[in-house]
Every structure is written in structure tokens, then in C-alpha cells.
Image (cartoon, rainbow, N blue to C red):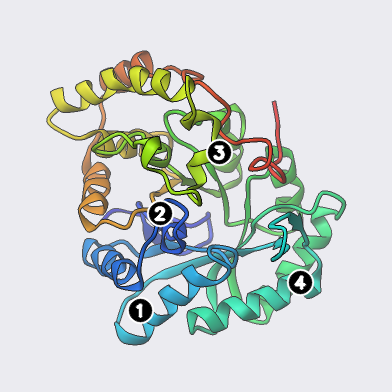
């Protein structure tokens, strides 16, 4: 597996990571056994970077990773996140970047994972009223204590990244980025490159739309994240599937799959871009890994851009509720 740096001064990690939100069931029921099999497949493929968060199943994802690490030898670089509060009775989200909250949630995450240190600790969502410089002071203290390695932020703006990076080096920014979610091209990918910050791309396969088989919204469980997502409701969904079909056919003409081609496209966006697909299938993970060795020519990149130009997708990438806490820009 090829390696990419986790920030200019960070450790090398696999060019492809594994997103572990799926271990908490946002796209349907799963089991610890299934998640452990996926982690084993990642290890065997040379994937060394895994990504989770304290709110993924309210600790479920972290605990599944912890139970795997307790039974198996694996050299994973682990990233987790904090900063979101969720009311257990109403499900309403609020954001808290206070020192006490971040410290307490990190301690819980370390217990869940069964480790005394994580390689990367993200602010999952910024608390709008708290200066980011103050948050950086908190994160630097946690790093000085040896509890975290790199500092990261999720779904922030390029301007916020510059403010944070002026205080101390930021290792990574994580945002949604794929062929149908291109906002990072409007400044974040470039800012990360200029500052020496890794750009970690979540949902690189469009929450399944670039998978081997298109998703079927009629089969979504009530708890499926996509059920209320604008891109998966009609008429947007049918329009999106029609737009993506030529890309599927192009992948087949190249002797590859839509999954591998979508991953290869992301990796071609810059040596600092690290996709973290989430899957519960070892076969799908192998397909993603195939994209790492797929080197695209200039003509192939141009054809992909012709087939799926920036802005082709119908519908917002989040519903109004899902978008709360995301920093907009441009």
C-alpha cells in the first residue's frame, strides 16, 4: 500500500484509510463480527489509517475497534473526534469545544479504544461562538500531555484553518469530497496543500452511489442517514443515477470498477489527499484498494470531468438538519 504523510510533520499512513462510521450502523444494521472482519481485511491490505468518532453510535464504533485491537495485533494509526453533543431524549445536536468537554470526551474515547493515545484528534464541529485560537490552546495541551498526536478539524472553512494553523501546525482537515461533492475544490484542497495539511476525504464514494450496485432508497431502514438526504430522494435520486451511469460504463471500458475509478480520481487531486471510504464488506474494501494503484492519465482525468462536471449532482449534500455546524465558504 502506498503511503501519504499525515501533515507535513506527521507520520506516514496508507494512501487509503478506513472510515468506521459504518460500524455504528448509519446505513443499516451491522455486527461486531462483520466490523472485525472489515478491520482484518484492512490490515491485510496494508491500510494503516482508521477513522472514528465518539458520536458514531455514541461510542459503538470506538468500542468495536477497541475489542478488535484487544484480540488482534494490528498497527493502525487511529483518528477520533469530539465536539458534538447530542441530547439523548430529543436527538438535537449542539457543539461544545470547551476544554472540559474535549478532555472528558477524549478520555472516554481512549477507554473505548483501549489505548492511551490517538494519532489524530479532530474537532468534529466548531463551536461558532468560541475563538478557534482558544480551541487550539486546548488541543496543544492535550498533545503536550501525550494523549494525542496530530490536531485536526472537520468541516471547517479555509479561513478557519488559516487561523488555527497560525497558532500551531494542524495535521489534517476532514471534509466530504468525491466526484459529486466538490466544494473542497473551492479553496480547502488548495489551502491544505499550501499549509502542508493532509486533506482527509470522507464519503469518497458518495455514500454508495459509486458502488458496484447503485443503492436502492426503497430498501433504506428508518435509521439510514440517506433516507432524509436530498440527493437520495426523488426526483433527485433518479436524475443522479442517470448522470452517473456513463461514468460506470467508462470505468468498465477501462477494465476497472466505478469504486476504483472514483478513488483513483480523488488520489489524483493531490499527494496530500487521503480518502477514507467506509464499508462493511471486505470485497468492497479490496475494490477501493485497487484504486490506489490505478494511475490516471491526463486524458482519463479530462474524460471523467466531462462525464461528471463539478456541480452535476441534484440536491444539496445535506438536509438542513444534517448541515448544522458545517462551515460554509465561497
Return the x and y of residue 158 as percentages of the image width and height: 68, 39
* SS class, disc 3: helix
Q: Which residue is located at x 24 percent, y 38 percent?
A: 212
Query: Can residue 147 be seen?
Result: no
First along the sequence among labels 1 and 2 = 2
* SS class, disc 4: helix
Return the x and y of residue 57 as percentages of the image width and height: 53, 65
- Circle 4 or circle 3, nearest the eye: 3
> Relative to the observer, which residue lies in front, 20 or 115?
20
Q: CA distance from mark 4 to mark 2?
A: 30 Å
Q: CA distance from mark 4 to mark 3?
A: 30 Å
Label pair 1/2, CB-CB below 8 angstroms: no
Mark 4 = which residue? Answer: 101
Mark 3 = which residue? Answer: 228
- Circle 1 or circle 3, nearest the eye: 3
First along the sequence among labels 4 and 3 = 4
Return the x and y of residue 282 as percentages of the image width and height: 23, 58
* SS class, disc 2: loop
Mark 1 = which residue? Answer: 68
- Circle 1 or circle 2, nearest the eye: 2
Tag shown at residue 26: none
Q: CA distance from mark 1 to mark 2?
A: 21 Å
Query: Can residue 311 be seen?
Result: yes
First along the sequence among labels 2 and 3 = 2
- Left-right relation of 66 to 91: left
Amino acid at each position: 500500500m502506498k503511503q501519504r504523510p499525515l501533515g507535513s510533520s506527521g507520520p506516514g499512513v496508507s494512501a487509503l484509510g478506513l472510515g468506521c462510521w459504518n460500524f455504528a450502523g448509519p446505513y443499516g444494521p451491522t455486527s461486531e463480527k462483520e466490523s472485525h472482519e472489515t478491520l482484518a481485511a484492512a490490515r491485510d491490505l496494508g491500510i494503516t489509517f482508521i477513522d472514528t468518532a465518539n458520536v458514531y453510535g455514541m461510542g459503538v464504533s470506538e468500542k468495536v475497534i477497541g475489542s478488535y485491537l484487544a484480540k488482534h495485533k494490528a498497527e493502525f494509526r487511529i483518528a477520533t473526534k469530539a465536539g458534538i453533543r447530542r441530547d439523548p431524549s430529543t436527538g438535537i445536536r449542539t457543539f461544545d469545544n470547551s476544554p472540559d468537554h474535549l478532555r472528558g470526551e477524549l478520555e472516554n474515547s481512549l477507554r473505548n479504544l483501549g489505548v492511551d493515545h490517538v494519532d489524530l484528534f479532530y474537532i468534529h464541529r466548531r463551536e461558532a461562538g468560541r475563538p478557534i485560537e482558544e480551541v487550539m490552546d486546548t488541543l496543544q495541551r492535550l498533545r503536550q500531555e501525550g494523549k494525542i498526536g496530530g490536531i485536526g478539524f472537520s468541516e471547517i472553512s479555509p479561513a478557519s484553518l488559516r487561523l488555527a494553523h497560525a497558532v500551531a501546525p494542524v495535521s489534517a482537515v476532514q471534509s466530504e469530497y468525491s466526484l459529486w461533492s466538490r466544494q473542497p475544490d473551492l479553496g480547502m484542497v488548495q489551502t491544505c496543500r499550501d499549509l502542508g495539511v493532509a486533506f482527509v476525504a470522507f464519503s469518497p464514494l458518495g455514500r454508495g452511489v459509486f458502488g458496484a450496485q447503485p443503492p436502492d432508497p426503497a430498501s433504506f431502514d428508518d435509521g439510514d442517514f440517506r433516507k432524509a438526504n436530498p440527493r437520495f430522494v426523488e426526483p433527485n435520486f433518479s436524475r443522479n443515477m442517470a448522470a452517473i451511469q456513463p461514468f460506470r460504463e467508462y470505468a468498465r471500458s477501462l477494465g476497472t470498477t466505478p469504486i476504483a475509478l472514483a478513488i483513483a480520481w480523488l488520489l489524483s487531486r493531490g499527494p496530500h489527499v487521503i480518502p477514507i471510504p467506509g464499508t462493511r464488506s471486505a470485497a468492497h474494501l479490496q475494490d477501493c484498494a485497487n484504486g490506489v494503484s490505478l494511475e490516471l492519465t491526463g486524458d482519463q482525468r479530462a474524460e471523467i470531468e466531462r462525464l461528471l462536471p463539478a456541480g452535476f449532482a441534484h440536491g444539496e449534500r445535506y438536509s438542513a438538519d444534517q448541515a448544522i455546524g458545517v462551515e460554509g465558504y465561497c
